[in-house]
Image (cartoon, grey):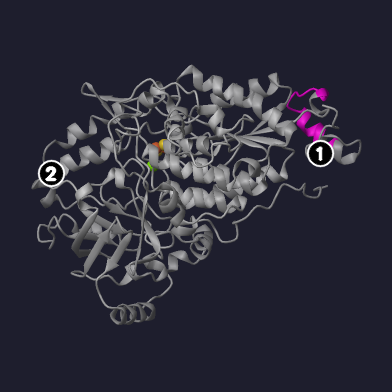
């Protein structure tokens, strides 16, 4: 190359022969770093969500060490830094409550520091979108290295999947089929190695979305956390990010509209989590790519789900990797012309199709041929109607097909506490045809939009052998969960959406084929109920201060990705003024 090398942003710190350059280098040298490391090498940030409170990311210091080896080998200098870690299993009220907070941490840490490019170490559900959102708002060269899924769970001689088995066994306890002791005995066997949930939950979905978006090396999504090849991938990603820094291969060149369309198609094929609709919108918003809920209908609907993984199907992430992983899925789609933009650029400098067109496929049971799908039309179903003017979503691959067209009487719960207090009541007026409706679990209502949308069924119906019912709420649901569950109703009840005024006994029609969610009352009655609801609203005292106040005041609705209104957009990585 004859071009003059690009001036790196880290040179604004370390490349100076003045008082400020002295200060930047001198304090760094207290870590035992020799002077030559500051003479123009790309400085590679390793953004680490390691935490012992995020068990899914607890192996990330080892992962970071392998990234560092690659960075050194390619002639860069790695600097690891921690950011807020969103652990799905422990964080209350929900890890979603702090996704935007983490994204702010990431964005400001990148922009304010001598970093030329960044490796994003993400794993547990919200860590992937949080890191991509923050990095996208800076638009620096970035590559995601996921932590990888746990090994298959093992219990009483069979494979069990993260999360999914909890929902299944808990229903069996409530139906009186197993004891509480039997239920608890599955704990250790479900989570028997480091890594993220081994089902196609939100973590595996978002790792797959990152790979489909082109912001990872091939195979990032599925290699198990403890497989040596996960650490090879980390090493290679460390090598590649140094080149990306020199090439100025920024996120905006990868996170294009075309890449998002590819990801939506892939999400349908893998039977991915409904949470992807929220997170992809939030990431797109940060990089300035328009993306609407209806894009999921236009691009995703009609796509068969071909990956037979729990919660929609049978297998787990280990089998998915051994069967060929995400490149095999892209190959299957692409051979039938179902990858919308095969030429989309990816982190290794090649197109998505170049990376995947010859990908081996080792197991047709796990990654099925398109003509033998798990679900013929697996794209997320976007619903609209007078009950969800700004949309709602349902995951057909995890639903009961016969309930996708359904009319039923509403059994209404005002909030999650009300649901918990009454669901087991033997006198609850409910039948298998009823529709369970829960309010006030949306972004502002919970706040944080908890994963409570897959409300457990009334025990008296479980005992009768009922396995699924239509459920509607403004909540989310875990990517490991299943059922005919309408989620993300927007606007949410707390924001004055029509969900707020549904009453016990109202008839509701769910029509997935036509994307319709309809409350069967006339418009005048709906208006009158909404006017009365607004009069009765008082702000909650708990929302008056602290982060919760910021959250409730600024969180956008589900169809807008639940980002904070003031965080949407790309603010670049211009070097800020000196501090001294
Ligand atoms: Fe962390 Fe599922 S709880 S990935
Ligand atoms: Mg989850």
User: Whole-Å distance between the Cαs marked 2 and 1?
Assistant: 64 Å
Residue 159 lies in what quarter of the image?
top left
- Residue 460 vs 117, above or below: the answer is below
Q: Which residue is mark 2?
A: 175
Q: Nearer the viewer, residue 337 or 127?
A: 337
The percent position of residue 412, horizontal first and vertical second, equals 23, 65
Based on the picture, tell me whether residue 25 belongs to the magenta stretch: yes
Q: Quarter for ligand 1?
A: top left
Residue appearing at x 48%, y 48% in the figure? 279
Q: Which residues are magenta?
A: 22-36
Kindly tell me whether residue 89 is visible in this rendering: no
Residue 98 drawn above or below residue 526: above
The x and y percentages for residue 541 are 44, 68
Q: What secondary structure do most residues of the magenta stretch adopt? A: helix
Residue 557, percent across and down?
46, 61
Q: Secondary structure at mark 2?
A: loop
Q: Is residue 90 left or right of residue 279?
A: left
Which residue corresponds to mark 1? 13
**Residue 531 badge:** none
Q: Nearer the viewer, residue 562 or 349?
A: 349
Badge 2 or badge 1: first in the primary sequence? 1
Q: Secondary structure at mark 1?
A: helix
- Residue 349 is left or right of residue 224, and the answer is right
Query: Alpha-carbon neighbours of circle 1 within 10 Å: few (<14), some, or many (≥20)?
Result: many
Residue displayed at 45% across by 31% down: 335
Whether residue 27 is visible: yes
């Amino acid at each position: 190359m004859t071009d003059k090398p690009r001036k790196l942003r880290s040179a604004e710190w370390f490349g100076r022969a003045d008082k400020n350059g002295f200060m930047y280098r001198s304090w760094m040298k207290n870590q035992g770093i020799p002077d030559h490391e500051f003479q123009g090498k790309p400085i590679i940030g390793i953004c680490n969500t390691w935490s012992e409170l995020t068990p899914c990311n607890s192996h990330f210091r080892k992962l970071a060490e392998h990234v560092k080896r690659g960075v050194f080998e390619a002639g860069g200098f790695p600097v690891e830094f921690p950011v807020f870690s969103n652990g799905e299993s422990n964080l209350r009220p929900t890890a979603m409550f702090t996704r935007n907070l983490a994204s702010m941490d990431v964005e400001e840490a990148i922009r304010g520091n001598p970093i030329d490019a960044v490796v994003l170490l993400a794993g547990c559900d919200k860590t992937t979108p949080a890191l991509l959102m923050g990095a996208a708002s800076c638009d620096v060269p970035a590559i995601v290295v996921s932590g990888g899924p746990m090994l298959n769970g093992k219990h009483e001689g069979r494979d069990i999947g993260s999360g999914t088995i909890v929902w299944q066994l808990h229903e069996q306890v409530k139906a009186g089929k197993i004891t509480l002791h039997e239920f608890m005995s599955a704990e250790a066997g479900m989570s028997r190695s480091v890594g993220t949930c081994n089902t196609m939950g939100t973590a595996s979905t978002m790792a797959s979305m990152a790979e489909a978006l082109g912001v990872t090396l091939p195979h990032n999504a599925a290699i198990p956390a403890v497989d040596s090849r996960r650490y090879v991938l980390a090493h290679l990603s460390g090598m590649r990010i140094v080149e990306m820094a020199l090439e100025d291969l920024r996120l905006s060149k990868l996170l294009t509209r075309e890449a998002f369309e590819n990801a939506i198609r892939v999400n349908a094929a893998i039977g991915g989590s409904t949470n992807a609709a929220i997170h992809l919108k939030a990431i797109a918003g940060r990089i300035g790519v328009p993306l609407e809920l209806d894009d999921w209908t236009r691009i995703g609907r009609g796509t068969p789900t071909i990956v037979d993984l729990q919660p929609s199907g049978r297998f787990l992430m280990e089998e998915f990797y051994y069967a060929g992983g995400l490149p095999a899925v892209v190959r299957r789609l692409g051979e039938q012309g179902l990858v919308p933009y095969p030429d989309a650029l990816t982190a290794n400098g090649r197109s998505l199709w170049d990376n995947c067109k010859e990908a081996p496929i080792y197991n047709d049971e796990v990654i099925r041929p398109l003509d033998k799908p798990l679900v013929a039309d697996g794209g997320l179903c976007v619903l609209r109607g007078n009950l969800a003017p700004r949309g709602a979503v349902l995951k057909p691959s995890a639903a009961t097909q016969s309930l996708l067209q359904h009319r039923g009487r509403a059994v209404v719960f005002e909030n999650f506490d009300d649901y918990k207090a009454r669901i087991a009541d033997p006198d609850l007026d409910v039948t298998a045809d009823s529709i369970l409706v829960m309010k006030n679990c949306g972004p502002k209502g919970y706040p944080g939009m908890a994963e409570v949308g897959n409300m457990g069924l009334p025990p008296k119906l479980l005992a009768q052998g009922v396995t699924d019912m239509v459920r509607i709420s403004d909540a989310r649901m875990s990517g490991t969960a299943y059922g005919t569950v309408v989620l993300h109703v927007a606007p949410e009840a707390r924001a004055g959406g029509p969900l707020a005024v549904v009453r016990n006994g109202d008839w509701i029609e769910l029509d997935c084929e036509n994307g319709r969610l309809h409350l069967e009352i006339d418009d005048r009655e709906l208006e009158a109920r909404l006017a009365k609801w607004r009069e009765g609203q008082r702000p909650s005292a708990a929302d008056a201060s602290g982060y919760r106040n910021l959250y409730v005041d600024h969180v956008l609705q589900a169809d807008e990705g639940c980002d904070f209104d003031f965080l949407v957009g790309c603010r670049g990585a211009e070097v800020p003024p000196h501090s001294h």
